[in-house]
Amino acid sequence: MMKSAQNRIVINQLRAGDRCEQVFLVASRELRQTKAGKYYIRAVLQDSSGQMDAVMWDASESIAADMPPESFIKAQVRVEQYQGALQMVLESFRPVDAETVELADFLQHTDKDVGELWKSSLGHLRKVKDKALLQLIKQFVADEQLMERFRSAPAAMGMHHAYVGGLLEHTESMLASASRLLGGYPQLNADLLLTGIFLHDIGKTAELSCTTSIQYTDPGQLLGHLVQAVLMLQEKAKLAAKDLGGEFPAETLNQLMHIILSHHGQFEFGSPVLPATAEAVMIHYLDNIDAKLNGLQQALESALPGDGNWTVWLKMFERRMYNPKG
């Protein structure tokens, strides 16, 4: 029988000095050694409100074997501040049978209606008039398995939209923002912009998996979502070309590949090329704005009364952020 957790203290409510004993999902776990040769465990624990780093000192190989990734444990923990962020210190734990927990209590998911997000996204894409781009979009939308993953995938491992449905939420937000801004920038190719937004993170559907926790797939680790998105684009462009009765326009394909490969905006963030077209520049900044504001909103929502006017140190901003409602 499935049992729902009752009276849980969720992760995003924990603060330095807190102690609790409850069930967590083990998102990841590594057994490491100190310079003195002693074993300790580094883990990430998760529930539906978020994740937190965890450490267990004086560990062993057998102890680590009792908490494999994507398993459940009932742990007694205390929370401490470490290098500007919160972490749990595991004092003890025991494995928990997955059949006794309700998975929804441990998976983060969008708080928006997925059906409405998808309907809105398609509405924006129907504005595309270019025959080649429209046929390309149709090839993607007709791939039901791919679109099912697109509607349920997270947009990232962490930082922003890192939850079930996050990729669709992120994409729809960017499409809506672009639609509002297009009137002020007539030099932009609207069809290329909207199609580029739809496809810029499509590789996340292959890079990330989300069953009990968000993890990289093997191809995701080996190739990354930028390369995977370009491979998907090339495949669908060939199918679109058949319906177009000829070759897919090379210039259009090159521009779309450039948008995908450049949208991180900087070499150090993984883009092999920098944005070099007006549409690529727009998509990079829309992507960055939406990611940053979503990450900040999650941090503000996780703040508790009495936490003060500043968030915890946030990696994506490399600083604490002001919370006027603190």
Image (cartoon, rainbow, N blue to C red):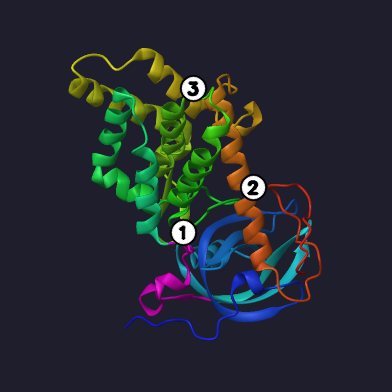
CA–CA distance between discs 3 and 2? 23 Å
Q: Quadrant of residue 87?
A: bottom right
Marks 2/1: CA–CA distance? 22 Å
- Distance from Cα at disc 3 to Cα at disc 1: 31 Å
- Residue 109 belongs to the span the image colors magenta: yes
The answer to whether mark 3 and mark 2 are in CB contact below 8 A is: no
Residue topped by disc 3: 258
Q: Specify the segment rendered in magenta.
A: 94-112
Q: In the rendered image, which quarter is residue 321 located in? A: bottom right
Residue 219 pos. (x, y %): 40, 37
Label 3 vs 1, first from the N-terminus: 1
Q: Identify the residue shown where x is 77% and y is 76%.
A: 17
Q: Is residue 316 left or right of residue 70?
A: right
Q: Inspect the image, locate mark 3, and give the three-letter code of the amino acid beneath it.
A: His
Direction from residue 54 to residue 128 in the image, left or right: left
Q: Judge whether residue 20 can be spotted in this image.
A: yes
Q: Which residue is mark 1?
A: 213
Sequence-earlier tag: 3 or 2:
3
Q: Which element type, helix, strand or loop, lies under badge 1?
A: loop
Specify the amino acid type for callout 2.
Lys
Report the quarter where the N terminus lies. bottom left
Residue annotated with mark 2: 292
Residue 108 in the image: above or below residue 2: above
Q: Quadrant of residue 61?
A: bottom right
Q: Earlier in the sequence, mark 2 or mark 1?
A: 1
Task: Pick the residue in front: 58 or 80.
Answer: 80
Q: Of circles 3 and 1, which is in front?
A: 3
How many circles with numbers are drawn on the protein? 3
Location of the C terminus by quadrant is bottom right
